[in-house]
Amino acid sequence: MAARSNDERSVQRVILRRDHIAGGVFVAAGALVFAMSGDLPFGTLASPGAGMMPKLALGLLMAFGAIIVLRAGDSPAFAEIPWNDFTHAATVVAVASVAIALYTVIGFVLSVAPLLFVLLYFIERRRFWRSAAVSVGVTAASYLLFSKLLKSPLPPMPFYWF
């Protein structure tokens, strides 16, 4: 057997792992949104501005993403991940994308309720009446919480009456 040279022995093979990708996405997305939100005033601790909470949340997102990257040695290699559930994930992303695109056009209630129903009934194969009850109940509770209790403006429906 031929002896290896010093260069061959000193080169370590870097293995890309699942958590390298996931943590990197969190760090990159946080940095991108942080850069785009530069016009929001941060303020001070005594008088917080509109940008304080979003920027603190983005800082935490990037910090935890960096921790995931640093702890990536415990996760499986990216090349070993089975992709047999890709169609399920792509369907969820497609349905959510349609709901996001229609959110400001048809309003909160008419976009969130069908989104939840489609995800539960068609994708997760739950029973019809249970899917309908959960989607209507979660949408109504979310609407009441954000619109009425927290006074947060939500996009109205085209036939908005309350």
Image: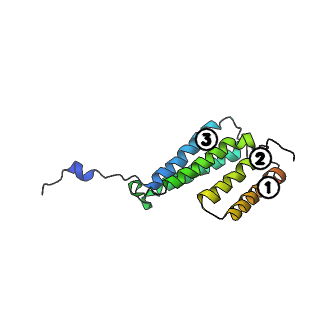
Label whose residue precedes the other's in the sequence (2 or 3): 3
Residue 103 is tagged as: none
Q: Position of residue 77 (x, y in %)?
A: 40, 57
Q: Nearer the viewer, residue 113 or 146?
A: 113
Residue denoted by label 3: 33
Residue sitting farthest toward the front: 128
Q: Residue at x 66, y 65 (%)?
A: 127
* Residue 140 on image: x %, y %: 78, 56
**Front tag of 3 and 1:** 1
Q: Which residue is mark 2?
A: 46
CB contact under 8 Å: marks 2 and 3: no
Q: Does the CB distance between marks 3 and 1 fall below 8 Å? A: no
**Sequence-first disc among 3 and 1:** 3
Residue 103, located in which quarter of the rendered image?
top right
- Height in image: 89 above or below 103? below
**Label 2 environment density (alpha carbons within 10 Å; few <14, some 14–19, many ≥20):** few
Q: Amino acid at mark 2?
A: Ala
For label 3, the SS is helix
- Alpha carbon distance from label 2 to label 3: 25 Å
Q: Residue furthest right?
A: 162
How many numbered dots are placed on residues in this image? 3
Is label 1 in a helix, a strand or a loop? Answer: helix
Compute the Cα span from label 3 to label 1: 26 Å
Residue at 46 percent of width and 52 percent of height: 20
Answer with mark 1 or mark 2, whichever residue precedes in sequence: 2
How far, Cα to Cα, is label 1 from label 2?
28 Å
